Image (tube, rainbow, N blue to C red):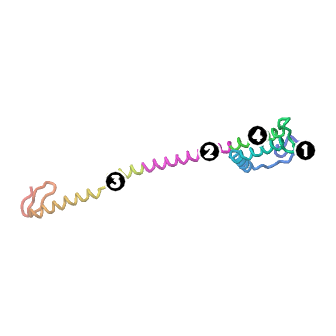
């Protein structure tokens, strides 16, 4: 049956079945491999592998050698090239994923810094408003000073035995004409 070109591409029949690949799972596996390749353990394993390979194919029983040193250990070179051809893209994939994570973290840090700045500015405005409001409020020391002054005036009136006009500071006695 011929492929119909008037239908959406997703609905057309294909010879190969679609394979669903979980990109995140594949990325995690790639990162795990890339992390392992960057460890001293991997280097030690590769060194042991190459030494055993070279030793076996150099001094091992002639009948059991599978990679001739006369041809420059072609099979070993092929295997190491294959390993390198797969490790480079895996390392790049891991780096790309790390860059994406760093980008997201930087964006979240930027947003957090913006929120902190906005909160700080709000609190600074609130503190300024409180300072302005407190400058108009009578403080405890101010009230005590006023009460002390009133007590001194009352004590002075009692000592003089008469009333003192607070506004003019003149004494008035009962029965005397006011000025």
Tag 4: Cα neighbours inside 10 Å, few (<14), some, or many (≥20)?
few
State the residue in front, 103 or 89. 89
Q: Nearer the viewer, mark 4 or mark 1?
A: 1
Q: Mark 1 highlights which residue? A: 63
The residue drawn where x is 78% and y is 40% is: 80
- The Cα atoms of the two marked residues, 2 and 1, are separated by 55 Å
Q: Position of residue 153 (x, y in %)?
A: 15, 60
Is 58 placed left or right of 27 in the picture? right
Q: Position of residue 149 (x, y in %)?
A: 19, 58
**Marks 3 and 4, how far apart at CA:** 73 Å
In primary-sequence order, the first of circles 3 and 4 is: 4
In the rendered image, which quarter contains the C terminus? bottom left
Pointer 3 residue:
134
Q: Is residue 70 above or below residue 41?
A: above
The residue that disc 4 covers is 84
- Classify mark 3: helix, strand or loop: helix
First in sequence, mark 2 or 3: give its number. Answer: 2
Marks 3/1: CA distance? 99 Å
């Amino acid at each position: 049956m011929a492929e119909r070109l008037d239908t959406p591409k997703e609905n057309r029949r294909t010879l190969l079945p679609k394979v669903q690949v979980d990109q995140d799972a594949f990325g995690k596996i790639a990162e795990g491999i890339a992390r392992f390749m960057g460890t001293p353990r991997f280097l030690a394993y590769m060194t042991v592998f190459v030494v055993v390979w070279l030793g076996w194919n150099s001094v091992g029983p002639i009948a059991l050698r599978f990679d001739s040193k006369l041809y420059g250990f072609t099979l070993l070179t092929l295997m190491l090239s294959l390993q390198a051809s797969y490790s480079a893209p895996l390392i790049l994939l891991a780096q790309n994923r790390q860059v994406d994570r760093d980008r997201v973290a930087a964006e979240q840090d930027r947003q957090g810094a913006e929120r902190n700045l906005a909160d700080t500015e709000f609190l600074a405005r609130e503190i300024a408003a409180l300072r302005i409001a407190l400058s108009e409020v009578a403080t405890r020391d101010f009230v005590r000073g006023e009460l002390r002054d009133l007590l001194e005036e009352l004590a002075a009136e009692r000592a003089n035995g008469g009333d003192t006009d607070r506004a003019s500071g003149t004494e008035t006695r009962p029965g005397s004409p006011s000025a």
